[in-house]
Image: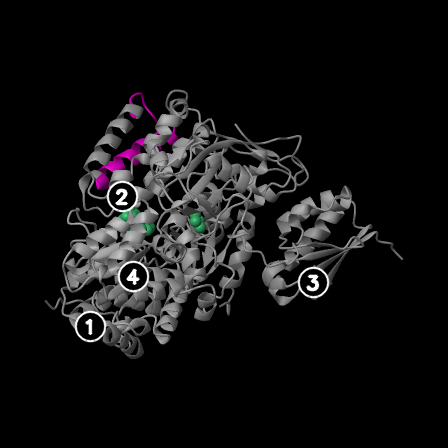
Amino acid sequence: MLKQIDIPENDPVAVADRRALIDEILAANKDRPGGLMVILNEVQSKIGFISEPMQLYIANRLHVPVSTVHGVVSFYSFFTTTPRGRHTIKFCMGTACYVGGAPQLIEKAKQVLGIEPGQTTKDGAITLEICRCVGACSQAPVVVVDEDSHGRVRPNKFPQLVRGLTEPGGN
Amino acid sequence: MAFFRSHVLVSVDPECLKRGALEVVDALHDELVAQGLNDEIQVLETSRIGDPVLFGPDLMVYPEGVHYACISADDVPYIVTEHFLKGRPVEKFRAQERVVVDEELGAPKPKEVRVVLRNIGKIDPNNIEDYIAEDGYAALAKVLSEYTPEQVIDVILASGLRGRGGAGFPTGKKWQFARQNPGDIKYVICNADEGDPGAFMNRRVLEGDPHAVIEGMTIAAYAIGSRQGYIYCRAEYPLAVKTISIAIEQARDLGLLGENILGTDFSFDLEVRIGAGAFVCGEETALMASIEGRRGEPRPRPPFPAVAGLWMKPSNINNVETYANVPQIILRGAEWFASMGTEKSKGTKTFALAGDLKNTGLIEVPLGITLREIIYDIGGGIKDGKGFRAIQTGGPAGGCLSEEHLDLPIDYEGLASAGSMMGSGGLVVMDTGNCMVDIARYFMDFIQEESCGKCTPCRIGTRRLLEILTNICEGKGQDGDIERLEELSGWIKATSLCGLGQGAPNPVMSTLKLFRAEYEAHIYEKRCPAKVCKALITYNIIKETCTGCTVCARNCPANAISGERRQPHRIDPDICIRCGICMQVCNFNAIEIN
Ligand SMILES: Cc1cc2nc3c(=O)[nH]c(=O)nc-3n(C[C@H](O)[C@H](O)[C@H](O)COP(=O)(O)O)c2cc1C
Ligand code: FES
């Protein structure tokens, strides 16, 4: 069952404190019924992605085939296998936002940042994403910057939204 | 010394600087010189006007004392023309008084009746005592001390409560099946996946009155004989997850969850499980697969969850709103609940109003109310003086309804007979600026993206539908496309495994039925009557109206707009990608679509 794969030296599995974090999450949840989803959700939110070596590591620790873990990771859109930027900007493409001008806003974002949805800027600052309805429909169109949602964003206000994120030292 | 008739103060606090205050200052100087007003109006920088986080960059104009908020350089030409040249303060840029308004849930409108939403915004959701003060957990106490499980089920049956998650199955019957199926271990599950775009009722209930859901689930557990429950909440709702988790802790601390609840021999506990962004997980069998830690793929029913549900044990699954109704029914009686609504659909229903309406947000109304009452009496009608085109109900598996359905009383049967469905309660209202073929294409895009891929009709059929719809929108529609859409829709509906595929053709079928002429205009005349479909329209600048303020040119992502400053601009149709940004940013309404 052990598949040979190359583990990059900066993979969380190879970095001591990251690995300790994964171990901690595993220990807390591995005996829980249906714990795999809980573990993957925790790993995704605390580490930010679930790489192939991480999937293999989790599979081994849970004594399940890696295909099971990979099957779950690839099924759900929240799980990603590569790191994202320091900030994530998500555009809601739910019905209300679609009719409320989200497509235009995305065009603007592509122009301002020079990347397509799903990509990360070269400096690793921002990842653009398109997401499902975030449930703030009465304020369409909605843009979620990290944890904060911004409603009624007009295309020409978009640059203001990202300005703080791209500057050095911008958090 | 120069005498200035007005002074403009620009806030240059660090937050405002970050957001481009200096560009605003430059733009002001520029524009004032250009309009010959630089001897009359003075621009000053000041440290701070309003709260920069809320308003920055902001401007204050004296002597009028007009406060403009969230201004960018693009807004400056319009302010200078309107305010300084013509003397008309620009209302749309003015800072609103900082009153805390709840944009989602206002005061109840005359036709509303609040049962599920009654506590929201009134009680502190993080404090169980607030809930208890509003008769919270009194229903649970009454049930545990006075009712047998069978009697609880009888009350719910008599109330006529039906599932609020979409299909409208009688809740009492569901509980009865789960009770009758033998087994030591049974589960109670709350469906808080709320995946329909345009719906956010369940989120507000979880965030605003979490204990009502916990109490409802506990009563259900007593009725069917369960000791363990799960709340499956979508990951897009972090605040709801947090609030309900705190509420569970607090209920446990007071002995309202856990072993020997209220000193009886009834025990029940709850756990929250979080989704990971898959629409199909709202379907009950897929949801249970996800709780089990697997891929959220649905399976054929029967066996129904009441027979073999979570981990193959008898399980009862209901929607958030279904459970939230339960304590009120126990306390106020089945007759009270059944006195509201229509013959077959009792009680109230929450709806999320979104789209081109004056008042959007959450409402709760007795079933049987008409769409007209919702749109015009509660929603305030269509905004910006446009006309009503369609209302989309029931999410991606629902359908669009038009003018002719406005007087239809809303209940489960009524909506279904009109070709739509109740769904979870998202209502998206569309004005005449929406192309119904494009809307059908949008939903098909959503569905084929979210199809889990397990069954062929849904996986491949929806993709084919999308291809045909995309072609029609791109002006490549052919004779016979409408018939192909109809035939394919029929097959997908008849042969898909779960409700996702079975409902997938609904938006296409309902728009075809009501707006066939629009499809025909796209296919045979290569024309989009609503002026939406990009391949069939061109943008144009009205020479007479354009002031040459350059906002459109600077915002155009394709650099398709050219022109001298202060001269009318023009759009090069060969470069234009028809994104419509110019139209949104133009303050002078100088852009038209042909
Ligand atoms: C594709 C699909 C998505 C669904 N999404 C939801 C949902 O987000 N929330 C929900 O309560 N029910 C949803 N349902 C309905 C559930 O399968 C189920 O009928 C419901 O949870 C039962 O609860 P109720 O009887 O209280 O309505 C969905 C069904 C399908 C087929
Ligand atoms: S559609 Fe965007 S928040 Fe609901």
Image quadrant in which you'd find residue B418: top left
At x 64% / y 38%, what residue is drawn?
Answer: B588
Q: Are marks 4 and 3 in contact (CB under 8 Å)?
A: no
Q: Is residue B543 magenta?
A: no
Give the Cα distance between marks 3 and 2: 52 Å
**Residue B149 to residue A18: above or below:** above
Q: Are marks 1 and 3 in contact (CB under 8 Å)?
A: no
Numbered range of the magenta stretch: B458-481
| Mark seen at residue B500 | 2
Give the Cα distance between marks 4 and 3: 62 Å
Which residue is nearer to you in this view: B278 or A77? B278
**Residue B542 to residue B257: above or below:** above
Pointer 4: what residue?
B147
Give the Cα distance between marks 2 and 1: 33 Å
Q: Are marks 3 and 2 in contact (CB under 8 Å)?
A: no
**Res B56 seen here:** no
- Counting residues from the start of the chain, the first of labels 3 and 2 encountered is 3
Which residue is nearer to you in this view: B202 or B144? B144
Residue neighbourhood size for the residue with mark 1, other residues' Cα within 10 Å, grouped as few (<14), some (14–19), many (≥20): few
Amino acid type, residue under disc 2 in the picture = Leu
Which residue is nearer to you in this view: B64 or B234? B234
Pointer 3: what residue?
B49
At x 37% / y 23%, what residue is drawn?
Answer: B523
Amino acid type, residue under disc 1 in the picture = Asp
Q: Dominant secondary structure of the magenta stretch?
A: helix
